[in-house]
Image (cartoon, rainbow, N blue to C red):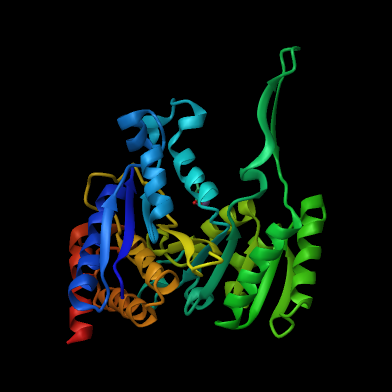
Amino acid sequence: MASQKLLLLPGDGIGPEIMPEVKKVISWFNENGDMSFETEEGLVGGSAYDAHGQSISEEDMAKAMAADAVIFGAVGGPKWDDVPYEVRPEAGLLRLRKDMQLFANLRPAICYPALADASSLKKDIIEGLDILIVRELTGGVYFGEPKEITDLGNGQKRGVDTQVYDTYEIERISKVAFELARTRNNKVTSMEKRNVMKSGVLWNEVVTQTHGNGYQDVELEHMLADAGGMQLVRWPKQFDVIVTDNLFGDMLSDVAAMLTGSLGMLPSASLGAPDEATGKRKALYEPVHGSAPDIAGTGAANPIAMIASFGMALRYSFEEVEAADKLDKAIAVALDKGLRTKDIAGEGQATVSTSEMGDAIVAELSALSA
Ligand code: IPM
Ligand code: MN
């Protein structure tokens, strides 16, 4: 395989602590696999703001556009609570998503057998859970205009965000969901609020139409997003693939993540459309968790979501399915052997540091290849 260019953007908080662990994994594949990755690093979020007053520089944006995949840590923290809205840490991530046109956000929620006791739900409800949330990522209320606070001149202000979806945006995200469902348990649940939102009515219509145009082999179900949230905590195993808009997807994926026992475990992939000439998609891979400023600097962060995000890069950007399976297996074995960072340790259970967990996963990769 020709050399692949990765842009590493550690970001803020625990981001710079978990990124070195994924670098160990990348080096392992460079040395032991038949693939070759070149890495470059850049700044995003508060760390970019501190360095040059922007949440991502033009130079790093250009590197992201040119990379075969971006590996992203996390952004944000109380340190930047008072920076101007336009350059707040999250703006860097949103710009990457928008400019790279990463409209499809894949957020798997799987329950590792070794962690079935770590969920706040009863074990039989989440044991064996394996669902995939497909979140629309470049539209909806995140980017709709107008988006503003205006002064009404009578001592009142008005805050406005705009929820807007065009047919093509709903169509392309539902296709992604149907296609992924075919590789899994062949069921898609679409979630919106058609009972109160016009964008929900259109969402529902377009998903149904798209289903009728070549995806009838996939089971399709519609659910109101509030009921969907309720069903997610009641009986999550009823779902296979959930497709939903940007804001509902943000909330529902946090709920789904918590079901699995730890937010620190879950990776995500954000993908663009395949390039017409090369067939390659722009892509960014990031943990579902945030920058966890409360534990930053303590060596307690769980690097698994970050490492598993690189696993998704192997799967979705580089078609290295075997390598991705091997990495997922290495993570599962390390957990089976009882290795726990603080966030996933049971009462009285011994814990390992961020770098010890990274080393253990690399050791399991070697053991699986021996
Ligand atoms: C996420 C995060 C982001 C979002 C923030 C950091 C802008 O919560 O990726 O889920 O709201 O999309
Ligand atoms: Mn979120």
Q: Does residue 47 appear to the left or right of 84 in the view shown?
A: left
Q: Say which quadrant the N terminus sits in.
A: bottom left
Side (left or right) of 32 relative to 131: left
Horizontal and vertical percent position of residue 364: 21, 77
Return the residue found at the far top: 154
Tell me if residue 137 can be seen.
yes
Relative horizontal placement of residue 320, taking residue 222 as reference (left or right): left
Q: What residue appears at the point 36 percent right and 46 percent down from the top-left corner? A: 292
Quadrant of res 227: bottom right
Task: Please state which of residues 293 and 43 is positioned toward the viewer in this rendering.
Answer: 43
Residue drawn 29% across the image and 46% down it:
295
Residue 151 drawn at (x, y percent): 70, 17
Q: How many marks?
A: 0
Quarter of the image for the C terminus: give it.
bottom left
Identity of the residue drawn at 65% across and 79% down: 187
Q: Residue furthest front?
A: 277
Where in the figure is residue 169, as x and y percent of width and height? 68, 58
Residue 183 vs residue 240, the one in the foreground: 183
Say if residue 74 shows up in the picture: no
Horizontal side of residue 335 vs 208, given as left or right = left
Q: Position of residue 283 (x, y in %)?
A: 46, 60
Q: Residue at 50% x, 71% y: name it.
A: 122
Residue 261 figure quarter? bottom left
Can you say whether 127 is above or below 48 in the image? below
